[in-house]
């Protein structure tokens, strides 16, 4: 729960202090999807937070099931080779969906994954210098900043354009 410390502004002669709780290994794991509309004119961010837990195959499956509730169009999943993404129960569920396909990015290529740009932006901009005292405040801060990002379509679009993939947006 240690904050990422970035340069900040403060009144002259008043050094900003960041109070933090040490020796805390609690975390908030997140799973997200950047969804491009079939007309390629809209980008949306869907996410789910898991306080003090690791992302595993049941968590990925639950996220995909809720995502399928929101998406009624054909879906192509582009994701990294995280073990939970390749799990049998996840791939079997995708195989049962008629209009869903799963494609994997090359190994060790985070620059191709647009959601990595989302997490990098949140950590280095929105949540920089944020000093949560407990897991609940860390979860609330992550949720607040992620929801704020959902309402910034131009920024979400830039995450997609920043990857060297063949995803052309209008």
Image (cartoon, grey):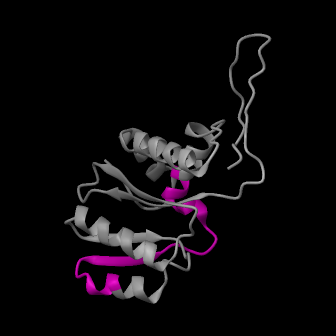
Q: Residue 84 location, x and y as percent?
A: 51, 78
- Count of marks, rendered view: 0
Q: Residue 128 location, x and y as percent?
A: 63, 38
Task: Check if residue 87 falls in the magenta segment.
Answer: no
Describe residue 162's horizontal placement relative to residue 156 as left or right. Answer: right
**Extreme residue in the top direction:** 12
Q: Is residue 21 visible?
A: yes
Q: Which residues are magenta?
A: 93-118
Task: Check if residue 117 falls in the magenta segment.
Answer: yes
> Residue at point 43% right, 73% down?
60
Task: Identify whether 6 is placed above or below 57.
Answer: above
Describe residue 117's horizontal placement relative to residue 37 as left or right. Answer: right
> Residue at point 55% right, 44% down?
137
> Residue at point 39% right, 78% down?
102
Q: In the image shown, does 100 or 12 lie closer to the viewer?
A: 12
Q: Is residue 164 visible?
A: no
Q: Residue 68 location, x and y as percent?
A: 27, 69
Q: In the image shown, does 16 or 122 lie closer to the viewer?
A: 16
Q: Quadrant of residue 149?
A: top left
Describe residue 67's horizontal placement relative to residue 149 as left or right. Answer: left
Q: Residue 11 location, x and y as percent?
A: 71, 12
> Residue at point 80% right, 11% down?
13
Q: In the image shown, does 116 or 58 lie closer to the viewer?
A: 58
Q: Quadrant of residue 155?
A: top left
């Amino acid at each position: 729960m240690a904050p990422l410390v970035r340069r900040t502004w403060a009144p002259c002669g008043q050094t900003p202090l960041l109070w933090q709780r040490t020796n805390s290994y609690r975390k908030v794991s997140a799973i997200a999807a950047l969804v491009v509309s079939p007309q390629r004119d809209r980008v949306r961010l869907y996410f789910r937070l898991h306080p003090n837990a690791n992302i595993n195959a049941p968590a990925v499956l639950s996220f995909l099931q809720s995502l399928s509730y929101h998406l009624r169009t054909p879906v192509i999943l582009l994701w990294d080779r995280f073990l939970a993404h390749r799990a049998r129960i996840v791939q079997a569920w995708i195989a049962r969906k008629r209009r869903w396909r799963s494609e994997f990015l090359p190994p060790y290529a985070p620059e191709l994954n647009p959601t990595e740009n989302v997490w990098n932006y949140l950590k280095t901009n929105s949540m920089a210098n944020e000093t949560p005292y407990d897991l609940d405040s860390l979860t609330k801060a992550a949720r607040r900043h992620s929801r704020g990002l959902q309402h910034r379509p131009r920024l979400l679009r830039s995450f997609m354009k920043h990857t060297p993939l063949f995803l052309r947006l209008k």
